[in-house]
Image: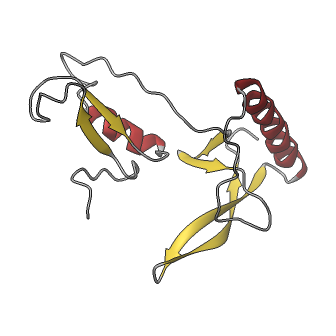
Amino acid sequence: MALPLRIDGLPNIRQVPLNLDSNLNSNNQSIFGSGMPTVDGLRKGLEMMGSIGKQPRMVYWTSMREEPVLYVSGRPHVLRLFDQPLENVVTTGVSAAAVEGMESALKLDVLNELRSHDGRLLLHDEVEENGKFIVTVVWCRSWHS
């Protein structure tokens, strides 16, 4: 079953009315959900939600992720275990303080790697190939080095 909404960079976007007695085509409030967006995908989604224009709607955006997210060149990257690169790290119920600690450690790791590799950062990406995901290596150069 395909989702009715499709926005490049905003995976698995879906919409339901806030009031179940209303429909999605009216100007009533809606709740949207999605996977982790790219920066461009988030912009496109906010535009579709009506938050941009002459009379922008108020949009409240929250992330329910329980892990730090690093955006590089507009794309989100998250931590993975070495032996499970395609699986989410299970951190269900982790405290906000623990996530903030992981964010601080990740930031220091990234800055140290940029310093020690001449402004380059080694990342891994998931690429779909023949219906399966494979992990690829991506070197990113910092424009601030």
Looking at the rendered structure, the number of numbered marks drawn on it comes to 0
Furthest residue in direction right, as rendered = 116
Whether residue 129 is situated above or below residue 21 in the rendered picture = below
Q: Residue at x 64, y 38 (%)?
A: 66
Q: Residue at x 26, y 31 (%)?
A: 49
Residue 119 or 109: which is nearer the viewer? 109
Where, by quadrant of the figure, is residue 59 drawn? top left
Quadrant showing the N terminus: bottom left
Residue under the point 20% across and 25% down? 19
Q: Horizontal placement of 142 versus 56: left or right?
A: right
Residue 120 at x, y = what percent?
Answer: 77, 53
For image coordinates 65% across by 42% down, the residue present is 70
Q: Quadrant of residue 101?
A: top right
Residue found farthest to the bottom: 130
25 to the left or right of 110 = left
Left or right of residue 60: residue 114: right
Query: Where's residue 48, x and y in %?
Result: 24, 36
Image coordinates of residue 118 in percent, x first then y, are: 84, 51
Q: How is the image coloured?
A: secondary structure
Left or right: residue 69 compared with residue 46: right
Which quarter of the figure is the C terminus placed in?
Answer: top right
Q: Is residue 19 above or below residue 25?
A: above
Q: Position of residue 3 (x, y in %)?
A: 26, 56
